[in-house]
């Protein structure tokens, strides 16, 4: 059963807004980034249910290539130049902006300062006092004071990307079916699942099965240091949705065996939410241990011959 509902899909939802009527499903956008194919424990402390060494700065360009779209990327400079660039660009149409530091976006409840969380929005208008955005995290037509937006857009507390990054001029350059877009990322998915990427990862970082097993140890020991909150509010939510969408997309692209494994991963990650929230940490640790061997299984399944596929 495909999932339809809320979830932290900020860059994929922002892409869909910019692509308009020609946009593929957000599930296809998300999966073509390559993000769902793996798990990483960054610096031995922060868990993400996404590919080892991956981040949205890597994935977003890959997704556009796979989907047959282009855009112009602009970044850098000082705040005044960046704001002028944004104000000029938005006169020609909406602008994709990010990464931003979500903690500076004070229209988001309980945000009072940087929290090290990346975010993406669509900018609709700029004037001397505010930046008007469609914030895909539940806030259409949000008005963000210019000072807050620029602090967020500088993104000094986000661990990837360049300050003041935006994309403009979204153009469809090729007609690519959803199935073919997914098939285009399968070779990269195999590489991600083999943990062959990740150059420059900080010491103590772990991939896939090793990440799951170490995370199980951390959870069983109390999930301290902000791990429990990170899992509850972000990592589990986006991880389970990505994997559910991955299963649907793999079935569409003709990989039914891999789709079945991805469904199993989605069930395990989604099942984490209740025990982590309620404090049943031994149960959560058991789920993570069960997740560990699935990454090698998924990689092996993606190497099998594909079939004709099943529509979403």
Image (spheres, grey):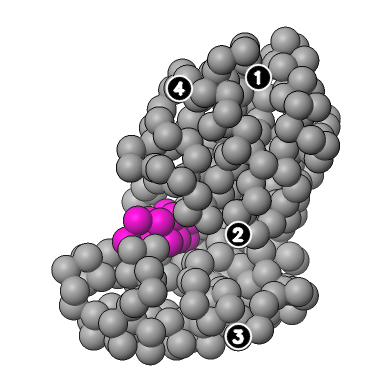
How far apart are labels 3 and 2 at the CA level?
Answer: 21 Å
Please report whichever mark, 4 or 3, sits nearer to the chain's N-terminal start: 4
Snapshot quadrant of residue 174: top right
The residue tagged 1 is: 94
Which residue is pictured at 69% across the width and 47% down the height? 60
Q: Give the structural element (helix, strand or loop) at label 3.
A: loop
The residue tagged 2 is: 35
Vertical relation: 91 (above or below) 205: above
Please report whichever mark, 1 or 3, sits nearer to the chain's N-terminal start: 1
Vertical relation: 135 (above or below) 124: below
Q: Is residue 12 magenta?
A: no
Q: Which residues are magenta?
A: 232-244
274 left or right of 103 in image: left
Residue 289 image label: none
Please report whichever mark, 2 or 1, sits nearer to the chain's N-terminal start: 2
15 left or right of 238 in image: right
The residue tagged 4 is: 142
The answer, for residue 96, to whether it is visible in the render is yes
Few, some or many C-alpha atoms within 10 Å of disc 2 (few <14, some 14-19, many ≥20)?
many
Please report whichever mark, 4 or 1, sits nearer to the chain's N-terminal start: 1
């Amino acid at each position: 059963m495909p999932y339809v509902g809320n979830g932290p899909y900020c860059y994929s939802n922002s892409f869909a807004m910019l692509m308009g009527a020609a946009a593929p499903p957000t599930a296809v956008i998300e999966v073509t980034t390559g993000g769902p194919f793996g798990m990483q424990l960054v610096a031995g402390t922060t868990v993400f249910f996404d590919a080892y060494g991956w981040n949205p700065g890597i994935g977003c360009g890959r997704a556009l290539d796979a989907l047959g779209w282009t855009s112009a990327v602009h970044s850098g400079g000082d705040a005044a130049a960046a704001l002028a660039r944004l104000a000029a660009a938005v006169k020609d149409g909406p602008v994709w902006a990010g990464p931003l530091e979500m903690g500076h976006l004070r229209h988001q409840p309980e945000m009072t300062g940087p929290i090290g969380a990346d975010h993406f929005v669509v900018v609709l208008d700029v004037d001397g006092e505010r930046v008007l955005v469609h914030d895909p995290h539940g806030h259409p037509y949000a008005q963000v004071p210019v000072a807050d937006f620029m602090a967020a857009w500088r993104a000094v507390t986000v661990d990837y990307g360049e300050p003041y990054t935006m994309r403009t001029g979204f153009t469809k350059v090729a007609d690519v079916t959803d199935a073919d877009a997914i098939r285009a990322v399968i070779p990269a998915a195999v590489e991600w699942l083999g943990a062959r990427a990740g150059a420059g990862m900080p010491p103590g970082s772990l991939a896939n099965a090793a990440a799951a097993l170490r995370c199980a140890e951390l959870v069983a020991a109390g999930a301290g240091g902000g791990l429990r909150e990170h899992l509850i509010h972000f990592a589990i939510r986006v991880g389970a949705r990505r994997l559910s969408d991955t299963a649907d997309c793999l079935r569409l692209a003709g990989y039914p065996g891999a789709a079945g494994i991805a469904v199993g991963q989605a069930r395990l990650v989604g099942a984490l939410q209740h025990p982590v929230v309620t404090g049943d940490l031994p149960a959560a640790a058991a789920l993570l241990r069960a997740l560990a061997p699935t990454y090698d299984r998924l990689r092996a399944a993606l190497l099998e011959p594909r079939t004709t596929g099943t529509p979403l």
